[in-house]
Image (cartoon, rainbow, N blue to C red):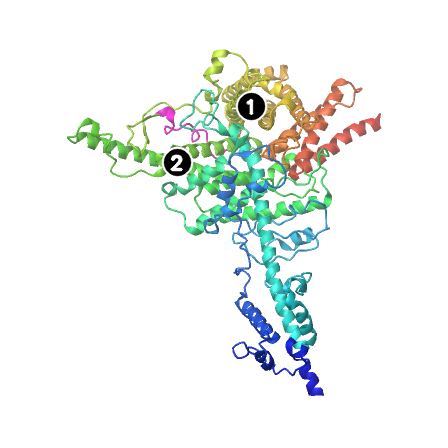
Amino acid sequence: MEGSRRRQLHSCDPCRKGKRGCDAPKDRQPSTFNACTNCTRWKKQCTFNWITKRGESKSTRRKARPSNPSHPGPDVIDANTEPLDELLSSMQGHPISLGGFFPSPDSLDYASSSPSQLDAPLSEISQFRPPGHGHPQSFAWEMGLPHDLPISPKPVRPLNTFQRFTQTGLLDSPPSSVDSAPNWFPQQEDVSELPPIQKSSERKINRQKSHPERENDQNSTSDYQWSFCIASENTATKSARAAMSRNLIRIYHDSMENALSCWLTEHNCPYSETTTKILPDKRMEDWGPTWSNRMCIRVCKLDRVSSSIRGRALSIEEDKTAARALHLAIMSFASQWTQHAQKGTGASVPAAIDEDERSIRENVWNEARHALQHSSGIPSFRIAFANIIFSLTQSPLDRSQEATLDQLLENDPAPISLETANRQLFTFRHKFARLQREAAASVHDDLENRRSLPTAPNDLNISQPSSSLDPILTSHEHRSTLGLMFWLGVMFDTLSAAMYQRPPVVSDEDSQIASSSSTAVSRTPTYPDHWDTPVHRTSPKQDLWGDYFLQSPIQRQKSQVQPRWPCSYQEAASILSEATPVKVLLYRRVTQLQTLIYRDASPTQIETLVQKTLSVYEHWDSTYRTFMVDCVTNHDLLPSRIQSWYVILDGHWHLSAMLLADVLESIDKCRLGCDSARQARQSTNLVATLRTNNALAVAALARASIQGPDSFMRDFHDSLNEVAFLVEPWTAVLVHCFAKAGYILLDTLDMSVDLNIWTDRVRQNCEYSIRALQYLGRKSDMAFVVARNLSRSLNSKLYGATWGN
């Protein structure tokens, strides 16, 4: 009986139902076993045949599965995200009416990405927080950011808190095998998914199997489900990466590229071949409701054809390093903006989310810094542009520190990245000028040789040059991009030198308009479909830092009327773009005054430059001041992009005026100028007037941006659209601007006298400056620290005086 009972427990379904003995062997092999004797005789489907084949299939899959998860099989989707070029290009023509955290589903064209064309894939992203944990709708931001070029498709273990993930190390490797993954995945196969014929027999077989057999089958089932879970995990990770990357590119697009479309055009760039004194025409596409990532795309194109400038082609590894550095710089720049600030609550962000986002910013900032340091020896326009972007990114600080604005600026590492970029751009421009001279000489000699040949005159323009010229010389777009990049570096270098009181990297002489510009060249006969390289002629250079930017466009000179709002959108954009170099000129004059003081120049030299500097200030007042006041008055009626442009431009201008007041005070206090000029300034109270007027103007900007039911800009990304100055890419400038205005107003506030209208006005404007700093404190630790310290000082002055009375 015992033997029969044991055989009954090892019988196939047809034998058990027919109460026959089953002779199926225990050690069945697919190659030797098809069915038991009874099933063969009665032509039944032997259950053990199906079990044997299924076990073999699972065994084959286990053997085929790679032991190293970094090389996924067909079940695991590659986690590479779209390359930076594709992400940037996909933003071209991006409508500003699109809002929200994620891009529209129609814009997520994952099929267009090609892993073989990746330049800088977004790196490892942490997994979503488990459902029900943390704050609602916060899952998309609670992911790690790029930290390495290769993307590992290994499953990342979700942790209970994102903070623990960031503290234990964003760079830590995820689990190396499924054995180390968490145990909350399903361990058993769902029987309801089996074919109906197999369900009952599967249940019975599991009951009848010995313990080792059941354990083996459960392990194989678990392995099968692990493969499915890993594939699903990687699919979700890839989608999350792509959404996160596009989200950050959108922030970069709405901030940096939006500002550059006003600051940096062929019409206001002195190094552009198309610079004119005519207002830009109405075909400026980047001023309309849609604009592209123009500068980043053009820089990438320029870098690909600049082998002659750098003297060699980049190696594959250098190209990847440059692409990764640019990608990380953009990711670090865009990750400054908080994703969970609540509308109308100032700097109020939930503490847990704020801590998570700060961890993300710090990790990505460090990653970008290491990438740029690693790429410092690579001559690349992309790396230069990445350094510029990174120099605008706020570094993480200890928010508990008690530091003044001057101390924070003194320890700010941003100027180092900007100086690195400018040195590289100046080197590129120097080499490009040499290439142009050599090419022009070669073409001139070639033309002379052809003229000496006995050929018909018409053949001169048909023949091709003996040697083809470099693409960077023959392409107007590439030459223009090079000029725009150099002017961008000079502009930022000028502002940084004045703010941080450092000497500029590019001197006044080296930043002059070179003879390679269209204003100092004449063109040679153009060879059809080949080239139009300028040939240099000797002509006097224009002084870039003289009155070059003070010459109004021809149309406005004829009208002799100051621009006012309301006006057309095109005219408003043209005015703001035209005024940008004038702002840069005042910063340059402030830097020149600082340099003369350092060099211990004569009083006559100093006073001459002071008068030139004040003439720039007067030019602004007579040309643009009224328009800016109109914009502040009608802030809520302005289009979103005009709001973002004028607020940033006007804030920069008022900061330069307050810096000028500091320099003039230093000159008069140390008696570095002429006595008569010093007495004239003191009698008119020039320094105090400059400070107070511009501080009040800055507070008015803050008030106009913060107040009003429609103060936020619906057309920009949700992280930027609450107040106009949040769009500012260079946060440190506005932090300096609002902080300086706040301290000037705080010093002006006199609590020793009875409260009056003037005192109350000064107090309110000081509070507006503090609120503006609190908004900026969402993305800037520097702004947070300054706002807190300034608020404490104001409260101490207000309530201390009240207590004393």
Q: Nearer the viewer, residue 296 or 699?
A: 296
Residue 107 higher or lower than 766, as above or below: below
Residue 429 higher or lower than 686, as above or below: below
Question: What SS does tag 2 mark?
Answer: helix
Q: Which residues are magenta?
A: 503-520
Residue type indicated by callout 1: Leu
Q: Residue at x 34, y 23 (%)?
A: 539
- In percent of width and height, residue 579 lies at 53, 23
Question: What SS does tag 1 mark?
Answer: loop
Picture disc at residue 533: none
Q: Nearer the viewer, residue 328 or 86?
A: 86
Residue 371 higher or lower than 691, as above or below: below
Q: Residue at x 62, y 59 (%)?
A: 229
- In percent of width and height, residue 495 lies at 54, 31
User: Disc 1 or disc 2, which is closer to the eye?
Assistant: 2
Picture disc at residue 430: 2
Q: Is residue 666 left or right of residue 129?
A: left
Residue type indicated by callout 2: His
**Tag 1: Cα neighbours inside 10 Å, few (<14), some, or many (≥20)?**
many
